[in-house]
């Protein structure tokens, strides 16, 4: 799937957002630093360290909570392609929605959906052949453009611990066991488009510490994302993204 999920790809993300200490709807923003690797059949590269913005909207109703989260289109971001004389850039966006039930014991369970959109462009200079020196071999640039949309259901379990009236610590773990995508690949030298289906799965989690002060909630923590995809045709590795993402964020209540 030739993407940063993180960024990630982009990222993840993910059910992160910012913890709330009241029952009012709220909107928040977190900045997430990407630390990890992106792996394909051609090798493994380090994901660029980027401040990834994530928007979060939560609407509680008694013990239920609706959360919508997303990363706007980021990129193109350049990084190591794994090939000589080749460059690679990725653009990624992410969306997530879940309905969560909070139990009096502090446990919670959620069901939702997750969606990634990505475009990766790889450009490589290819040198041709010619006669003996002083002939200069001709060269040309071959561009490969990969686009995909990956989506699936996500199941979540969590636990929140109130440390005081204003401070809380929470842990959330999510699993998307069956995600599906269709990669559309265009190679300039062939002037043709190829479609390749793939299947993927993702495990993600986050540990978050939140403090509410003067109606504003500040949150700090770390996310973990492990995304794995294979081609449906032969089961070969499409890509794998493993990310640790420290984050800091703020949220504001809506209404009075």
Image: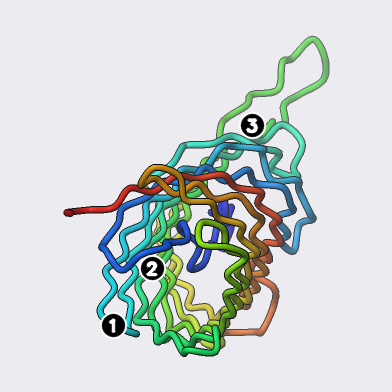
Residue appearing at x 71%, y 39% in the figure? 80
- Tell us which disc is closer to us: 3 or 1: 1
Q: Quadrant of the N terminus?
A: bottom right
Disc 1/disc 2 C-alpha distance (Å): 22 Å
Residue 146: x and y in percent read: 47, 55
Q: Residue furthest front?
A: 165
Task: Please tell me how crowded label 1 is: few (under 14), some (14-19), or many (20+) other residues with Cα within 10 Å.
Answer: few
Identify the residue under disc 3.
125
Residue 130: x and y in percent read: 72, 26
Which sits earlier in the primary sequence, circle 3 or circle 1?
1
In the drawing, what numbered circle is on residue 143? Answer: none
Disc 3/disc 1 C-alpha distance (Å): 59 Å
Residue appearing at x 43%, y 85% in the figure? 102
Identify the residue under disc 2.
96
Q: Is residue 50 above or below residue 21?
A: above
Circle 3 sits in a helix, a strand or a loop, which is it? strand
111 left or right, relative to 137:
left
- The front one of 18 and 43 is 18
- Tell us which disc is closer to us: 2 or 3: 2
65 left or right, relative to 204:
left
Residue 231: x and y in percent read: 59, 78
- The front one of 93 and 128 is 93
**One can see residue 3 in this view:** no
Identify the residue under disc 1.
62
Which sits earlier in the primary sequence, circle 1 or circle 2?
1
Q: Residue furthest left?
A: 255
127 left or right, relative to 249:
right
- The front one of 80 and 31 is 31
Residue 196: x and y in percent read: 48, 73
Circle 2 sits in a helix, a strand or a loop, which is it? strand
């Amino acid at each position: 799937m030739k993407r940063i999920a993180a960024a990630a790809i982009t990222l993840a993300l993910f059910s992160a957002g910012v913890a709330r200490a009241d029952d009012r709807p709220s909107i928040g923003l977190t900045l997430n630093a990407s630390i990890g690797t992106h792996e394909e059949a051609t090798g493994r590269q380090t994901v660029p360290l980027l401040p990834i913005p994530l928007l979060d909207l939560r609407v509680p109703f008694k013990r239920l909570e609706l959360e919508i989260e997303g990363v706007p289109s980021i990129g193109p971001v350049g990084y190591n392609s794994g090939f000589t004389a080749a460059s690679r850039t990725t653009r990624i966006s992410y969306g997530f929605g879940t309905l969560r039930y909070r139990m009096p014991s502090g446990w919670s369970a959620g069901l939702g959906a997750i969606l990634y959109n990505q475009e990766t462009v790889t450009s490589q200079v290819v040198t041709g052949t010619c006669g003996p020196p002083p002939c200069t071999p001709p060269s040309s640039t071959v561009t490969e453009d990969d686009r995909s949309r990956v989506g699936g259901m996500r199941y979540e379990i969590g636990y929140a611990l109130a440390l005081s009236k204003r401070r809380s610590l929470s842990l959330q773990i999510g699993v998307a066991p069956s995600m599906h995508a269709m990669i559309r690949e265009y190679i300039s030298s062939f002037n043709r488009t190829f479609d390749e289906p793939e299947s993927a799965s993702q495990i993600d989690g986050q540990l978050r510490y939140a403090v509410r002060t003067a109606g504003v909630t500040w949150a700090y923590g770390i996310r973990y994302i492990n995304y794995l995809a294979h081609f449906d045709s032969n089961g070969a590795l499409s890509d794998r993204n493993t990310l640790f993402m420290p984050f800091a964020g703020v949220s504001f209540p809506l209404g009075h």
